[in-house]
Amino acid sequence: MRSSNPVFSRRGFSRDNGYAGFNAQQPQAGGPAVGANPYATGNPYAEGAANPYATNPYAPQDVQTGAPQQARGNVMTIDDVVSRTAMTLGTVVLTAALSWFLLPVDPANLGKSYGIAIGAALVALVLALVQSFKRKASPALILGYAAFEGVFLGVISAAVSTYIADGVVVQAVLGTMAVFAGVLIAYKMGWIRVNRRFTGFVMAAAMGFMLLMVVNLLFSVFAGGDGLGFRSGGLGILFGVIGIILGACFLALDFKQVEDGITYGAPREEAWLAAFGLTMTLVWIYLEMLRLLSILQGDD
């Protein structure tokens, strides 16, 4: 299964070079044994027979019998994912805070700060796209993306807090954390089941959402105002909620990829891809949360 972020289509964790990918289903109690083939019937979530990862040099189970064995040292663990994600998100937060204080958004400097923010966003986009098409994770690209994304978020957050709704940034951060915690709990409790149907629905919805946002942007550029009205008023609130829900769905996909990668013994460097995907999804949720709260407070 190939997963993707709401913002950028990125490569899922693959099975290239003989290691396990983030494409198989997590074995569960009462389900197929470790090593069962989830692709035996052409359905990536069907129960099967042979181990599709028999050539995986890092897999923590015997490739013939599926019996657990001592894992090698180069496999990805949850600690690896947590530490890489902390580094990536920490870079975003640090550069956002520096941008908030070093790039003032007062009327005399607003144009310059906006210009720097837009330039940083474009650089972040390029770095993210380059990483998305690379076969292996590049920590330099991922941390570079996080740094430039942080510059953009810092300026935008400062402008919204200054000119639209004071205090909304703290609310958006808390809201993003609440979404993350809620989805994680729902996923671990089994309330969210990530399968092919779920993935297909989320991807189709995200593509439609992004297409509408692009059309709205084009209308706003050439016709002025708010375009089709997707970024303000009742429609803005509706699309803000939809954007947050889509972000939550992509968090579930990210959690599934991390879980499968750990189960099937993906190499440790793949933890950077997990951090990359989680960071992009959280940035998406934060921006949608910031916009939604700004609309709600602006209408008060």
Image: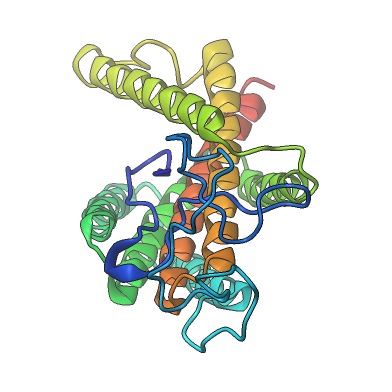
- At x 29%, y 72%, the residue is 138
Q: Colour scheme used in the picture?
A: rainbow
Q: In the shown orientation, is residue 67 left or right of residue 95?
A: right
Q: Quarter holding the C terminus?
A: top right
Could you say where residue 52 lies in the image, as x and y percent from the top left? 43, 57
- Quadrant where the N terminus sits is top left
Residue at horizontal 42 percent and vertical 60 percent from the top = 21
One can see residue 137 in this view: no
The total of numbered circles placed on residues is: 0
Which x, y percent locates residue 232?
50, 19
225 vs 9, nearest the viewer: 9
- From the top left corner, tell me how far across and down residue 6 is, in percent: 42, 38
* Residue under the image location 43 percent in, 30 percent down: 203
Q: Would you identify the image quadrant in which residue 142 lies?
A: bottom left
Q: Is residue 97 above or below residue 109?
A: below
- The answer to whether residue 210 is above or below residue 176 is above
Across and down, in percent, residue 223 comes to 23, 11
Locate residue 217: give its quadrant.
top left
Q: Nearer the viewer, residue 109 or 73?
A: 73
Which quadrant of the structure image shows residue 140? Answer: bottom left
Q: Residue at x 31, y 54 (%)?
A: 113
Residue 125 visible in the displayed image: yes
In this view, the residue farthest toward the right is 189
